[in-house]
Amino acid sequence: MISSIDIQHVKSEFPIFDREIQPGSPIIYLDSAATSQKPRQVIEAITNYYEQSNANIHRGIHKLAEEATKAYESARARIGNFIGARSQREIIFTRNTTESINLVARSWGKANLQPGDTILLTEMEHHSNIVPWQQLAQEIGLNLAFVNVLDNGQIDLEDYHSLLEREPRLVGFTHMSNMLGTINPVADMTRAAHAAGAIVIVDGAQSVPHFPVNVLELDIDFLAFSAHKMCGPTGIGVLYGREELLEEMPPFLGGGDMIKRVELTEFTTNSLPYKFEAGTPAIEAGIGFGAAVEFLESVGMENIRLHEQELTAYALDRLEEVPGVRVYGPAADQKGGVMSFSFEGVHPHDVAQILDSLSIAVRAGHHCAMPLHEKFHLPATTRASFYLYTDKSEIDRLIEGLYKVKEIFN
């Protein structure tokens, strides 16, 4: 199948692509795995809130407060529908994916885990799905186990099922690796984890923006993702959680809005989702998040996925042409639009700097996946990542840039 995205129309919706850093040279933005660009619709939604309805939410009864509250809660409802949640009560606004995972660790984890319990993760996790569990393990006395990643960049499912025999209390894994681009079989992994008696948390930071994700179909217990990677603003993310789990969990932070009643010696928590949303939130970011989801829905998540599949296959073929370049991760049909690669004899930072001089933005470093880089004996990689506004001509520009790198370093 071929994507029906009108790439030029889509790109025209993003004001940043009107900018030229080098005269006559448009921006080639290949760093969407770090953060996406923002369409005019999102920028205008944020501006409109500040210009027309700026007020705090949930507490006021005046017109501005009612407008702001309606816009914010409408965004929550749209996001819930976007991922197939059963109720708005299951959509908790956080600052980002990292905070969402920390919320689960600090609330569900501290309330349910005991010394000696096992948490099962994978070697391909982002630091955000490793460090919170390391902190909790040190505090409580937990055991951490990690599923092997094969040389082809895929999860070792035989090792995964073997480790499930240890009966972990919680299993956490990324839906799509931010370094390898590997798309993991979430439904199958979740089914096996539940059969072993575990709760499942999925890092959806790289999946929710790029292809359809339905929490009920996948049967996951928790899903964490961020607005800024899906055409939305920075500073806001979501934790989806099964309502019955969230109801039993203690609040993560204390203060205003997460309470129903406060006395000098005790308090009563608010109902979901507000129990986990202490203090004044990033109201404009929530409204912008809703606008981002509306924009993505107008393009179509299936269309975005097909478009990125085409780009991924094309990019892998083109990168193979460049002598000295090695791309990490599985084949095109098993990965998303993320190309982490090494260039023989050239440090990734040098690659990125030369490409930047050509107005090509890529990422160089460990991409918050140091254990995975260590597994492949890499100090760092260069990463090019794509989104709905990327086209094949920009990949061609990347290849031209890499030949320029080769020329400079002989």
Image: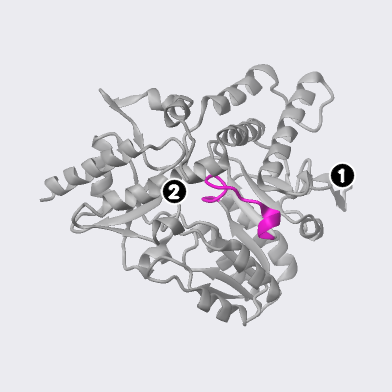
Residue 34 in view: no
Q: Residue at x 20, y 57 (%)?
A: 324
The colour scheme is one colour
Along the horizontal axis of the image, is 402 left or right of 195?
Answer: left
Along the horizontal axis of the image, is 7 left or right of 318?
Answer: right
Q: Identify whether 92 is placed above or below 192.
A: above
Along the horizontal axis of the image, is 325 left or right of 192?
Answer: left
- Amino acid beneath label 1: Lys
Q: Which residue is mark 1?
A: 260
Residue 286 part of the magenta segment: no
Question: For this rendering, which residue is in front, 338 or 98?
Answer: 338
Q: Position of residue 305 (x, y in %)?
A: 50, 46
Q: Residue furthest top?
A: 52
Q: Residues within 10 Å of mark 2 (few under 14, many from 20)?
A: many
Q: Identify whether 106 is placed above or below 60.
A: below
What numbered label is drawn on residue 309?
Answer: 2
Residue 323 in view: yes
Mark sitting earlier along the chain (2/1): 1
- Amino acid beneath label 2: Gln
Residue 209 part of the magenta segment: yes
| Range shown magenta | 205-220
